[in-house]
Image (spheres, rainbow, N blue to C red):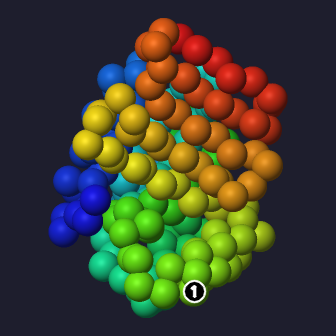
Amino acid sequence: MQEDNEEIFVNKIEKFLKERGFKTFREVIPDQCSSWEKPFRVDLIFYHDSLGYIAVEAKNMNTLGCGGVFADAFEQIKKYKQYTYLKGNLISKWCIAPAYNLFTFKENWMDNDRTLTFIKTFFRRYDISFLEYKEYDNPQRNRLIIDGLTPNKIMIGDSAKGYFILNKSKGDGNES
């Protein structure tokens, strides 16, 4: 999945989450910034009782060489983290979501894998998560994964019973 438009990418993530019962909020302004002429805006915040509020800053990228785009997202989140949202709620997890499938870059795949591991662990050091939305030909296989390479991985997808949330940090595999 290669997205040419960040908004289309966020629309897909939002639709995926809504179909699984999550509450979603777009272009959210921090409570403390609502009176500003040009307030900050978080691309997407989603909520589920088992996870709390998770904020997403999506970025359109076309190669792994978009380090400046990652840096911009990092700086945005650093600014945004200090505020409350949606009438006093703290964000439990902040995520960067690159608007492409990280596994479509087949050339030098081992170097790509090492680069992605470096990027993901760099952001984790600053308590910023990496969100990947994966689409497949069969929509039942679509997945949203947060911190995929860590012991605290969160995975959201479909199952025979509806949808599942695997939250390894809490040691559960909730099915709804």
- Where is residue 48 shown, x and y percent of the image? 55, 25
Q: Secondary structure at mark 1?
A: helix
In terms of image quadrants, where is residue 77?
bottom right
Q: Residue at x 65, y 31 (%)?
A: 166
> Relative to 100, does residue 172 appear above or below in the rendering?
above
Vertical relation: 164 (above or below) 156: above
Task: Please report the residue visible at 65 percent of the width from the left and 62 percent of the height from the top.
Answer: 128
Which residue occupies the foreground of this view, 140 or 174?
140
Task: Report which residue position mark 1 lands on.
Answer: 111
Residue at (63, 40) in percent of width and height: 154
In which quarter of the view is residue 121 placed?
Answer: bottom right
Amino acid, disc 1: Asp
Q: Nearer the viewer, residue 54 or 84?
A: 54
| The quarter of the displayed image where residue 38 is located | bottom left
Residue 27: where, in percent of width, then height? 32, 49
Residue 34 visible in the picture:
no
Asked whether residue 157 appears in the rendered view, the answer is yes
Residue 41 is situated, as x and y percent measured from the top left of the image, at 38, 57
Q: Quadrant of the N terminus?
A: bottom left
Q: Is residue 136 left or right of residue 128?
A: left
* 41 versus 11 height, above or below: below
Who's the residue at 48% across and 87% down the image? 108
| Residue 149 screen position, x and y as percent | 69, 58
State how many labels appear: 1
Residues packed near mark 1 inside 10 Å, few (<14), some (14 to 19) or many (20 plus): few
